């Protein structure tokens, strides 16, 4: 069981690292000389390889090692970062993913593809040694970890080094250019003054260098005195060694210090003599003890400045999303029970009970907000996936497209983010395929050859607006109308505004055969996009200017689990509308009804607003009240009213999914349990309005 | 560079000056040997040192160790020039004479 958990921890981390790797590679393609990015790519591969080997994913480790070896050359500057290298490394990243997927029960990874990638990478690096490092573990051990680290450099010049004109102090000073240096001269080899040849060098050094450079950079400094000295470079603060040391128990002195039984000064008095005793006993020269103490101090300083990876891991707890879902469900139940408690305490009118009920209400609200915030994720990771999509598709279609993003840190409920990927992929595919023109076409109309797609996210009240904007050829409303008529989606005499015409692209069956390519014709039309967004209780709006570009804006709720709703009634049946969509409530008097001459319209401050009478829509029995309440909501950018008997008020709505028996009742997007235990249905306004429109147009067509 | 002794011969004064580099290494060694000869108390003045290199540091270190070993009382006189402090620091000389080091030739400059 423990093994299974560990393995899943590796795969989760590996998938995350692969996303990072992809992102870094795409950035690197833009700035191929950025050493920081090259380092990031290398580190991601190095970690995948190391963890893979540790968790028994030998195939992952072996393949990644091959790729990493080539990329190491880019890191050391001997191999330039070219598009070819990026292409192959991206392909390698996909291959690693396939191997991981296969280990999770997916299709087996294509080994021939792996061989092709490795052959391609080796071809880029012809000077590479034929035998690629045999042992993954050995390779991992010889690689410098990321970030600043401490090296111990033992520099032992030969006595006659001065005769070649070399000044050892200049070499030591060169080391200082690489980072912070603590230099300890080892002078116990000095002979007595009388015996000394003053022109010979008797001093050796131990130098503790804290640097981000690697061992090669250190050795390079001594390259011209290789024959005149003995040089030993050793990395001291390996993160793995450190974690191991951290896991060991505390030393007695540390415990006494922590308990306040002794202070540091007293402790030092007792501890220091160890060095003295060693020196006095003639076991270790004094300067060697000093060097060891310096080593200890430098390494400790470095570790204190750079919190260990283990500490970082402690700061983040990975929890399976199912546990989180369960927590959200429980909080939902609590919100429902709390509403019931409020209702009962109100009825009983007991002051003590009311005080407790208020306190529970306060705590429940806080718990709800906290729980919901745990589920909120930044949309950036989803955005990053599209960089690859744009890169690959634009290359495939012979177009030049740059994807820019903004608002990547905008947070959305995890459930929304999970379901947002496919619709966004489809919208972006459409932009690439149908929106952005080829470079020569763009230049012919005076546009820059590189097309732009901008993906943005921004909070807007209780919603998030996600926009895909391109500077392509834009939508032609005339053409859209014409095609809609040809497809039988629109009657020939229908009058549509340009904005309404743009919405036709989301109509079922609108996609035309000539538009289907291997890019966007994957059997999913924009109507499916619309359905997906609506199932998330979101809306889509399209704006376009012919020849200039198109923007598609998705308006999505922050969360799907608990929303602010407006509770309304018809007879004794309750319904909930998402409060975010509600603009205002007005009364519908018998005079208003008389003035509308049988049509379902109401005059609101000289504005004619159509309305749907919910009682009629759902064929509910009973007499309607003399004065009805109309809730005016914004649906797809239009103001539409819904007539109810009464408006109860604002309501914390814990959304429950409807069972299979409601499969065909898609005018409801869920249900909620009220304080008295009764159920209120959540209205899907967009669908409801669309069905009414369709019904009316078919009735008109039929008449 | 010069060395002088008090009339009674117990105290010696060593004044080092100018460039203490490899070119001057041999005369420096001879001067240090002389300074460590007969006297019990020795003062060293480095104020006039203009340049110093590793050869001088090695010689001073070896001489200092000899003096301490032979029970001489050594003290520094005057200020230590910045150039001397810097080279000692760069070379990582931190002291080797143990408890008998009253002069603190190296550790003194690192304070």
Image (cartoon, coloured by chain):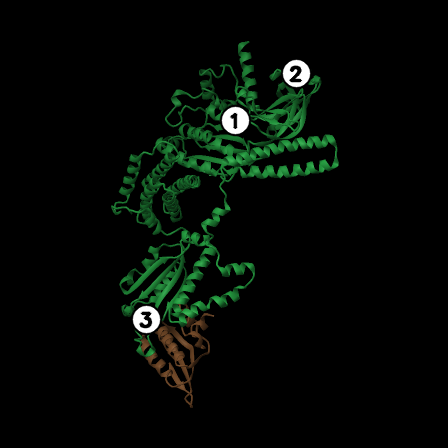
Chain colours: A green, B brown
Q: Is any part of residue A400 visible from this angle?
A: no
Foreground pick, A700 / A528? A528
Quickly name the residue at label 2.
A596
What is the spatial separation of the Cα atoms under label 3 and label 2, in whole angstroms? 108 Å
Residue found at x 44% / y 38%:
A384
Residue situated in front as seen by the camera: A442 or B47: B47
Q: Do marks 1 and 3 share a chain?
A: yes
Numbered tag placed on residue A202 in the rendering: 3
Name the chain letter of the residue that bears numbered label 2. Answer: A
Residue A220 visible within the image: yes
Using the image, name the chain to which the residue with label 3 belongs. Answer: A
Q: Secondary structure at mark 2?
A: loop
Q: Residues within 10 Å of mark 1 (few under 14, many from 20)?
A: some
Of badges 2 and 1, the one in the foreground is 1
> Cα distance, mark 2 to mark 1?
34 Å
A359, above or below A225, in the image: above
Q: Position of residue A248 (x, y in %)?
A: 45, 54
Q: Is residue A595 above or below residue A130?
A: above
Count of labels in the image: 3
- Going 48% across and 50% down the picture, which residue do you hit? A311
Residue at numbered disc 1 = A535
Give the label, 1 or 3, closer to the camera: 3
The extreme bottom residue here reads B8
The secondary structure type at the circle numbered 3 is: loop
Which quadrant would the N terminus of chain A be assigned to in this image? Answer: top left
- Foreground of the two, B24 or A564: A564
């Amino acid at each position: 069981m423990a093994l299974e958990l560990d393995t899943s921890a590796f795969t989760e981390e590996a998938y995350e690292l692969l996303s990072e790797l992809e992102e870094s590679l795409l950035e690197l393609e833009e700035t191929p000389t950025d050493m920081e990015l090259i380092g990031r790519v290398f580190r991601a591969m190095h970690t995948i390889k190391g963890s893979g080997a540790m968790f028994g994913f030998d195939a992952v480790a072996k393949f990644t090692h091959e790729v990493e070896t080539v990329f190491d050359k880019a890191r050391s500057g001997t191999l330039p970062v070219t598009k070819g290298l990026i292409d192959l490394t991206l392909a390698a990243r996909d291959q690693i993913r396939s191997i991981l997927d296969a280990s999770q029960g997916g299709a087996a990874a294509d080994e021939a593809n792996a061989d092709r990638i490795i052959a391609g990478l080796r071809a880029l690096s012809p000077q590479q040694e034929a035998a690629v490092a045999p042992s993954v573990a050995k390779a991992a051990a010889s690689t410098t970890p990321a970030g600043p680290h401490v090296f111990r450099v033992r520099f032992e010049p030969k006595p006659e080094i001065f005769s070649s004109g070399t000044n050892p102090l200049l070499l030591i000073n060169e080391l200082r250019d690489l980072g912070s240096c603590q230099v300890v001269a080892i002078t116990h080899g000095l002979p007595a003054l009388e015996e000394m040849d003053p022109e010979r060098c008797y001093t050796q050094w131990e130098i503790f260098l804290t640097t981000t450079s690697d061992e090669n950079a250190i050795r390079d400094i001594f390259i011209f005195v290789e024959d005149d000295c003995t040089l030993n470079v050793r990395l001291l603060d390996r993160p793995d060694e450190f974690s191991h040391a951290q896991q060991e128990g505390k030393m007695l002195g540390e415990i006494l210090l922590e308990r306040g039984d002794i202070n540091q000064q007293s402790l030092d008095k007792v501890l220091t003599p160890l060095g003295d005793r060693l020196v006095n006993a003639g076991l270790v020269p004094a300067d060697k003890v000093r060097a060891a103490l310096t080593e200890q101090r430098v390494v400790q300083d470095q570790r204190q400045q750079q919190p260990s990876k283990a500490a970082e891991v402690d700061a983040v707890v990975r929890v399976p999303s199912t546990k989180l879902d369960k927590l959200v469900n429980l909080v939902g139940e609590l919100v429902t029970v709390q509403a019931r408690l409020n209702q009962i305490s109100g009825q009983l009118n007991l002051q003590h009970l009311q005080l407790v009920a208020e306190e529970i209400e306060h705590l429940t609200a806080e718990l709800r907000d906290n729980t919901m915030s745990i589920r909120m994720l930044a949309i950036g990771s989803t955005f990053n996936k599209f960089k690859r999509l744009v890169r690959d598709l634009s290359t495939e279609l012979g177009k030049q497209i740059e994807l820019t993003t903004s608002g990547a840190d905008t947070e959305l409920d995890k459930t929304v983010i999970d379901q947002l990927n496919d619709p966004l992929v489809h919208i972006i595919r459409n932009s690439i395929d149908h929106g952005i023109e080829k470079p020569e076409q763009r230049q012919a109309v005076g546009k820059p050859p590189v097309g732009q797609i901008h993906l943005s996210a921004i909070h807007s009240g209780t919603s998030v607006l996600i926009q895909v904007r391109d500077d392509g050829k834009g939508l032609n409303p005339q053409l859209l109308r014409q095609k809609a008529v040809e497809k039988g989606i629109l009657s020939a005499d229908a009058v549509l505004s340009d904005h309404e015409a743009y919405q036709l692209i989301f109509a079922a069956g609108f996609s035309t055969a000539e538009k289907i390519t291997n890019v966007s014709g994957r059997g999913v039309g924009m109507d499916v996009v619309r359905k997906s967004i609506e199932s998330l209780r979101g809306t889509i709006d399209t704006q376009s200017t012919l020849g200039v570009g198109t923007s598609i804006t998705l308006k999505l709720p922050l969360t799907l689990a608990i929303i602010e709703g407006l509770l309304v009634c018809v007879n004794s049946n309750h319904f909930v509308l998402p409060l975010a969509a509600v603009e205002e409530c007005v009364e519908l008097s018998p005079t208003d009804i008389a003035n509308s001459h049988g049509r379902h319209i109401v005059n609101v401050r000289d504005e004619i607003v159509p309305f749907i009478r919910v009682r009629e829509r759902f064929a509910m029995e009973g007499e309607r009240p003399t004065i009805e309440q109309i809730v005016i909501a914004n649906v797809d950018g239009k103001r539409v009213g819904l007539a109810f008997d009464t408006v109860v008020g604002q309501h914390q709505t814990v959304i429950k999914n409807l069972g299979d028996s409601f499969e065909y009742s898609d005018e409801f997007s869920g249900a909620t349990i009220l304080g008295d235990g009764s159920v209120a249905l959540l209205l899907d306004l967009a669908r409801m309005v669309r069905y009414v429109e369709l019904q009316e147009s078919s009735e008109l067509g039929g008449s | 560079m010069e060395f002088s002794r008090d009339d009674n011969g117990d105290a010696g004064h060593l004044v080092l000056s100018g460039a203490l580099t490899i070119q001057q290494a041999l005369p420096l060694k001879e001067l240090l040997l002389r300074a460590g000869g007969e006297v019990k108390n020795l003062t060293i003045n480095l104020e006039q040192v203009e340049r110093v290199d590793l050869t001088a540091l090695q010689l001073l270190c070896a001489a200092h160790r000899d003096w301490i070993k032979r029970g001489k009382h050594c003290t520094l006189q005057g200020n230590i020039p910045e150039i001397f402090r810097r080279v000692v620091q760069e070379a990582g000389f931190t002291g080797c004479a143990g408890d008998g080091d009253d002069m603190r030739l190296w550790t003194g400059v690192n304070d």
